[in-house]
Amino acid sequence: MIYPLLQAAAYTKEYVGAWAQLGAGIGAGVAVIGAGIGIGGVGGRAVEGMARQPEMAGRIQTAALIFAGLVEGAALFAIVVAFIIQFKY
């Protein structure tokens, strides 16, 4: 199914644009999946840490929110780059 796409005689703007669209879609999807896994891991470890040491719950929660924000920021940056690639062609 994808083999005829690889046999293009000339690399036209439409051909390159199609591959850019495919790469942007896959890149955005992988970024969102990675962010979900990362935030889930941070949340799970934070809850586990709060269960082990309830007196440190405030500090753990603050750190977990900061880390979740950093993960979300990296994912947002990846999605923006994917959209830039998508709209370039």
Image (cartoon, rainbow, N blue to C red):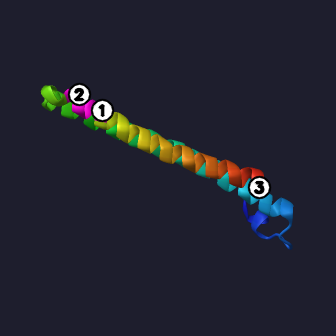
Quarter of image, res 49: top left
The answer to whether residue 70 is above or below residue 52 is below
- Residue 8 or residue 70, whichever sits in front: 70
Q: Are marks 1 and 2 in contact (CB under 8 Å)?
A: yes
The amino acid beneath tag 1 is Thr
Mark 2 element type: helix
Q: Are marks 2 and 3 in contact (CB under 8 Å)?
A: no
The percent position of residue 55, horizontal first and vertical second, equals 13, 26
Mark yes or no: residue 1 visible.
no
Mark yes or no: residue 17 visible.
yes
Which labelled disc corresponds to residue 88?
Answer: 3
> Is 57 situated left or right of 70 in this image?
left
The percent position of residue 19, horizontal first and vertical second, equals 73, 59
The amino acid beneath tag 3 is Lys
Task: Tell me the CA gap for discs 1 and 2.
Answer: 6 Å
The amino acid beneath tag 2 is Gly
Number of residues whose C-alpha sits closer than 10 Å to that of mark 1, classed few (under 14), some (14–19) or many (20 or more): few
The percent position of residue 44, horizontal first and vertical second, equals 30, 34
Which labelled disc corresponds to residue 58?
Answer: 2
Total numbered labels: 3
Quarter of image, res 50: top left
> Is 18 situated left or right of 68 in this image?
right
Q: Which residues are magenta?
A: 57-62
Quarter of the image that includes the N terminus: bottom right
Q: Residue at x 21, y 28 (%)?
A: 57
Mark nearest the camera among 1 and 3 is: 1
Mark nearest the camera among 2 and 3 is: 2
Q: Which residue is mark 1?
A: 62
> Is 59 situated left or right of 89 in this image?
left
Number of residues whose C-alpha sits closer than 10 Å to that of mark 2, classed few (under 14), some (14–19) or many (20 or more): few
Q: Are marks 1 and 3 in contact (CB under 8 Å)?
A: no
